[in-house]
Image (spheres, rainbow, N blue to C red):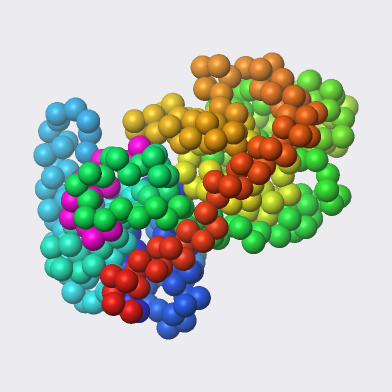
Amino acid sequence: MRVVLSGGGTGGHIYPALAIARECEKHYPSCAFLYIGTERGLESKLVREEGIPFESIEITGFRRKLSVENVKTVLRFLKGVSRAKQLLRDFKPDVVIGTGGYVCGPVVYAAAKLGIPTIIHEQNVIPGLTNKFLSRYVNTVAVSFAESTPYFTKAKHVLFSGNPRATAVVEANRERGFASLGLPQDSPIVLVVGGSRGAKAINDAMVRMVPMLKRLPNVHFVYVTGQHYYEHTRKEVLKSSDGVRNHLHVLPYISNMPEVLAATTLAISRAGASSLAELTALGIPSILIPSPNVTNNHQEANARSLEQAGAAVMMTEKQLTAELLFGQIEQLLKNDGHRETMRDRSRALGQPDAAMRVVSEIERLAGK
């Protein structure tokens, strides 16, 4: 089996692709991969760290307003298609998979024009421009949320697969999560994380919330600030953390997030698709604060999907205050029954076999 993967920009597009690759390897140990991305995106680092061969093309995203830059983007797209066709002819894949981000546009389009079986995966409830464009050319559109299906009326086939990232985290070891934080087993943990790059609004609320933590003396709060905000946030937290420092852990980044999540009692998080796939795969109750700075406000749609299912509480960034956030945390930690119901409903939304569903579709399209 020979598989080309493409997707990039953020971890939300890259981690599902890597999860598909790892699931393919379980069934086809001699499977060969090629990942096509950009040098500027996070994929150039993450994919190479995973030991998957990587090639790059130059491409930028379309702006939503008419501009000269969009003309340049069209020219880059055409050049990217030409470059992608050459890479595909050389590699001779059985199937090409795009997991979102503008880089997969020319790659998947080129594959479709060459007659190579193609799949795109949409992580969010509201699809991005690239996947909506590609949906009319590919063999299969795989979606993480059933609510996405009506957006793909021109697709040949829509598959509700779930997010492959769920498969990668479902067996995470909670004991290692506690150990990595240096905490006793079964300590109550509230994990606060604003995404891989951090979120200023959440960090500001965290800082103002520190004096309130004394009201929950047995709970450990793990604050993940993001590298960019770490030094400033840590200094601000130290000013008001007397008496709670043993239960307050401020970190710039967590490399073993699935294991830490497996040990978590309650998560406060953005509502990116991969984050929600992790939360639901493990059945973690959550308070979701969607980022307003994303295309089509898609994180709010993601969060509402979990809220309506009773798996999470949603709070918009405009509503966010330290008092309101801590009040929600306190209420959920003191109501075991409600939290257990959220846990069950979160787990019911999880798709731990998501990567296998995509691999089965690869097998079907490739005639394996």
Q: Position of residue 225 (x, y in %)?
A: 62, 36
Residue at image position (78%, 29%) is: 335
Which corner quadrant of the image does residue 248 belong to?
A: top right
Question: Magenta stretch?
Answer: 126-140
Does residue 10 appear left or right of residue 119 in this picture?
right
Which corner quadrant of the image does residue 229 belong to?
A: top right
Q: Is residue 251 above or below residue 89?
A: above
Q: Is residue 325 above or below residue 106?
A: above
- 318 in magenta: no
Residue at image position (76%, 34%) is: 337
Which corner quadrant of the image does residue 6 belong to?
A: bottom left
Q: Quadrant of the C terminus?
A: bottom left
Q: Is residue 210 above or below residue 11?
A: above
Q: Quadrant of the N terminus?
A: bottom left
Q: Position of residue 343 (x, y in %)?
A: 67, 42
Residue at image position (35%, 37%) is: 126
